[in-house]
Image (cartoon, rainbow, N blue to C red):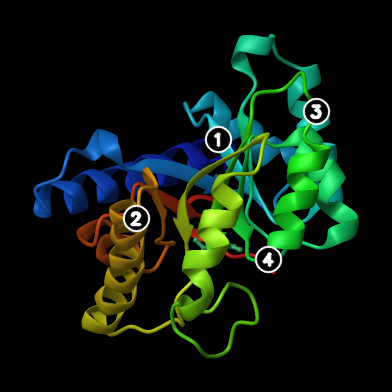
Amino acid sequence: MNRQQQIAEQLQAVRSRIIAAARAADRDPARVRLLAVSKGFPVEDLRAAQAAGQDCFGESYLNEALTKIAALSDSAPEWHFPEWHFIGPLQSNKTRGIAEHFSWVHSVDRLKLAQRLSEQRPAALPPLNVCIQVNISGEGSKSGVAPGELDPLAHAVAVLPRLRLRGLMAIPAPTEDGAAQRAAFGRLRAALEHLNTQGLALDTLSMGMSDDLEAAIAEGATLVRIGSAIFGARD
Ligand SMILES: *Cc1c(COP(=O)(O)O)cnc(C)c1O
């Protein structure tokens, strides 16, 4: 089997997992979006996924992403451009490139970075969709706002022009314990519901990766970020 067929098959297997997990949770599978996380993989792999129907890609490093964005927009008519999601740690010297080239940012965790993205989002483009990353497990990861600081950050980001606050993102501490996975994702869902009772209208829960997408979907994920299950192990 060649690489292109392999990616198409693995993509199909992930779609089947999403459908099964949604049905098991009594949810509409169409309400769970699959973001293909392509960091570390070459543009040919993205083309293979695109040929197999994948329409959005997640990248973590700006310079690597810009090369792929340029390659995939050169080769296709505009209606066939994929949608680009920035999911990596944000640094202030990268916000301009992100604001100019991406449709979504999942990793906003500080107001200053959100303000820069808002100021730098070109007027000719639609508002930049953003999620706030929450440090839901409290350990290990340096990224993400502490749960106790989420509410003021969310309300401040929600009023920035040129941004559209869509929801929350988390990368829980890895565990093979399904109940612990669900507990972490459940905390993110509760945080989103809480913000919506305060008048925000958030519709996106970005949670679930290759190893825990079932638990995330059971807890209400609307977007799962899947890399290795589609493209294989990264070195
Ligand atoms: C790399 C990455 C993923 C994908 O992880 P896999 O385990 O390969 O599915 C998802 N989200 C973020 C933020 C990532 O950096």
Describe the element under mark 2 as helix, strand or loop.
loop
- The label shown at residue 198 is 2
Give the residue type that dot 2 points to: Gln
Above or below, comparing residue 211 to residue 137 in the picture: above
Image quadrant where one finds the C terminus: bottom right
Which numbered disc flags the more N-terminal residue, 2 or 1?
Answer: 1
- Picture coordinates of residue 85 (x, y %)? 62, 43
Asked if one can make out residue 77 in the rendered structure from this viewpoint, the answer is: yes
Q: CA distance from mark 3 to mark 2?
A: 30 Å
Describe the element under mark 3 as helix, strand or loop.
loop
- Picture coordinates of residue 35 (x, y %)? 49, 44
Q: Residues within 10 Å of mark 3 (few under 14, many from 20)?
A: some
Q: Quadrant of ligand 1?
A: bottom right
- Residue at the spot of label 3: 122
- Picture coordinates of residue 160 (x, y %)? 65, 43
Give the residue type that dot 4 points to: Arg
